[in-house]
Amino acid sequence: GQNIDQPTEMTATEGAIVQINCTYQTSGFNGLFWYQQHAGEAPTFLSYNVLDGLEEKGRFSSFLSRSKGYSYLLLKELQMKDSASYLCAVLDSNYQLIWGAGTKLIIKP
Amino acid sequence: DVKVTQSSRYLVKRTGEKVFLECVQDMDHENMFWYRQDPGLGLRLIYFSYDVKMKEKGDIPEGYSVSREKKERFSLILESASTNQTSMYLCASSSGTIVTDTQYFGPGTRLTVL
């Protein structure tokens, strides 16, 4: 079966750095997405990785290792507004998106 | 900016009622999707459509149907609502010109079936 694993919840301090991991087992791979979802709101796109390595976008970076079936989202200089759920999703061989359950990130002052 | 709107943010219905959830996007996207989101589970695809009048079943189509009569509008229909269909329903769209294109989501409809 297809599976995406992420931690259910993480806590971090304002100004710090946090890494949210995602491991996947899917039938084929055509890229991995990270979305941010604030409580009660729609998911919004953060990043897309299809090649191995690190992609940096401001305070947020996303890393992919296809051989390990592993990705992480790195958030630097955390702000209170970064409190949200972070969803990992993989595009499989049929170009269907397989979603993880999301990681709820709590930022404390 | 892409805008995806959904007809209601909150909806309460009774068991057995027919329920219509509407989704409209304003970016001329080919692809539209309906998901449900439940605590502890990932987004689960109900149906999607890649063109007007075309529809494909997702992972959990049972108890649902869809309609896409116009490119900008994708409707989700619960023929006879049941309590296990209480959930957050999210609509999304993508351009379809690139298969890996980003999906843009609407704000969601929280449906409660009593």
Image (spheres, coloured by chain):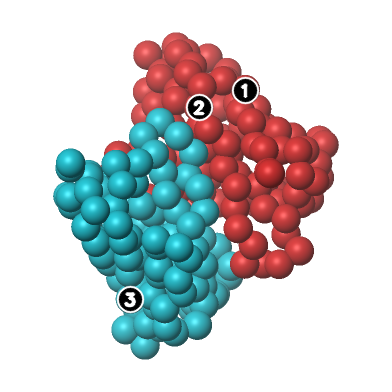
User: Which kind of residue does numbered mark 3 sit on?
Assistant: Tyr
> Could you say which quadrant of the image residue B84 lies in?
top left
In space, the residues marked 2 and 1 are separated at their CA atoms by 8 Å
Q: Which residue is mark 2?
A: B109
Query: Which residue is found at the position 18% from the left and 41% from the top?
Result: A109
- Crowd tier of the residue under label 1, counting other residues whose Cα lies within 10 Å: few below 14, some 14–19, many 20 or above: some
Viewer-nearest residue: A31 or A74: A74
Q: Measuring from the top left, give residue B24's x and y in whole percent.
A: 70, 33
**Residues tagged 2 and 1 counted as in contact (Cβ below 8 A):** yes
Q: Which residue is mark 3?
A: A70
In space, the residues marked 1 and 3 are separated at their CA atoms by 37 Å
Q: Is residue B94 above or below residue B112?
A: below
**Residues tagged 1 and 3 counted as in contact (Cβ below 8 A):** no
Same subunit, labels 1 and 3: the answer reads no
Q: Which residue is mark 1?
A: B7
Q: Measuring from the top left, give residue B94's x and y in whole percent.
A: 67, 53
Mark sitting on residue A102:
none
Residue at the bottom extreme, as displayed? A67
Q: Secondary structure at mark 1?
A: loop
Between circles 3 and 2, the one closer to the viewer is 3
Report whether residue A20 is seen: no
**Quadrant including the N terminus of chain A:** bottom left
- Crowd tier of the residue under label 3, counting other residues whose Cα lies within 10 Å: few below 14, some 14–19, many 20 or above: some
User: Which kind of residue does numbered mark 2 sit on?
Assistant: Thr
Q: Measuring from the top left, give residue B98's x and y in whole percent.
A: 71, 67
